[in-house]
Image (cartoon, rainbow, N blue to C red):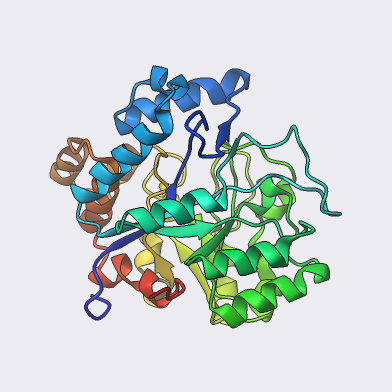
Amino acid sequence: MNGDKPPIDMHVHLVGNGRQGSGCWLRVRGWWHKPLANFMLGHIGLRHTELQAEDFDQIYVEHLLQQVRESSLSKLVLLAQDWVYDANGRKIEDAGSFYVPNEYVLKLAREHEEFLPAVSIHPARPDALDELERCLAGGAAMLKLLPNCHNVYCNDERYTKFWERMAQAGLPLLAHTGGEHTVPVVNAAYADPRTLQLPLECGVKVVAAHCATKSGVGDPEYFHIFCEMLEKYPTLYGDSSALATLNRCAHLTKCLRPGLSERVLHGSDFPVPIFGHRLALRGELKREDFKRCQAIKNVIERDYQIKRALGFPDHHFTQAWKVIRKTD
């Protein structure tokens, strides 16, 4: 293990409908996203009708607490979700499918020791630096962005001061890389991990979520580019979130290779559905392990057990502690 640190899941999504005053909102629209949302809720053990319930936000948080308390993980890093902005810092009101305020994740982390807060700040926001300071003071452990969905070109030199302040504060950037089909994409080109070079050059610890793997058949392949970048940038990491899924698992066992294993952190991407079927068909997951893991109802634990069965070592589940900001 990483010292005495226990296992941690550093990629867990928080959602809410805001009817209890959390400030969250959800826009589940379109022929694809509505059935996908219903399927994801059923997969994690919630009814799709609860999405519109007055107390959905509370239901979701309590379900997360139950999941982590009944799992092998000690803590979850909860991800906020900022609005979409244009390059000039103007909010794009009709873009995005969900919003989770920074104050909400900071509040939940104060109330529950199982949670660590990952805030979300679009660096083009007029108040980006002020909001960053507020979140640092509030105990932010990480900052999360989906550049291709948030419309963030991270190499824009106008964001240099923002990245430098993050580096100074020891706040890592968790940035989505690779294809995306669960959240609306604004600029697909920003899925390329090479768009993260400026924050890396500013000294930010950057975690390339999903190790830049493909999500859909037609997505560009960036995994090899991510691997090349690891050699150049010592503060670049990846995470294994959503890699135990049907669509992203092609490169999961490659993350066990020496030199790569030490730079990939454990994450589940909850509530994204976790299935071991393709891994079993490829012969990477033994039949008995597949059956055992698929029988686990707790999705956070299932993801952990699949990776254990594949041979991921202790340090995979603890090395995120070396990256996230120390808040105590």
Asked if one can make out residue 241 in the rendered structure from this viewpoint, the answer is no
Q: Nearer the viewer, residue 88 or 196?
A: 88
Quadrant assignment for the N terminus: bottom left
Query: Residue 231, located in which quarter of the rendered image?
Result: bottom right
Asked if one can make out residue 62 in the rendered structure from this viewpoint, the answer is yes
* Number of marks in the rendered image: 0
Please give the name of the residue rendered at 40% of the width and 77% of the height, measured from the top-left corner: 322
Residue 193 horizontal/vertical position (percent): 64, 62
Q: Is residue 43 above or below residue 323?
A: above
Q: Is residue 65 above or below residue 311?
A: above
Residue 81 horizontal/vertical position (percent): 58, 47
In the image as oriented, which residue stretches furthest toward the right? Answer: 88
Q: Nearer the viewer, residue 162 or 239?
A: 162
Q: Is residue 209 above or below residue 204?
A: above
Please give the name of the residue rendered at 29% of the width and 46% of the height, measured from the top-left corner: 300
Residue 133 horizontal/vertical position (percent): 63, 69
Q: Nearer the viewer, residue 313 or 310?
A: 313
Residue 54 horizontal/vertical position (percent): 44, 23
Please give the name of the residue rendered at 60% of the width and 46% of the height, measured from the top-left corner: 179
Please give the name of the residue rendered at 30% of the width and 56% of the height, measured from the top-left corner: 114
Q: Nearer the viewer, residue 46 or 218?
A: 46
Query: Residue 157, located in which quarter of the rendered image?
Result: bottom right
Quadrant assignment for the C terminus: bottom left
- Left or right, 53 with respect to 175, comes to left
- Left or right, 98 with respect to 253, comes to right
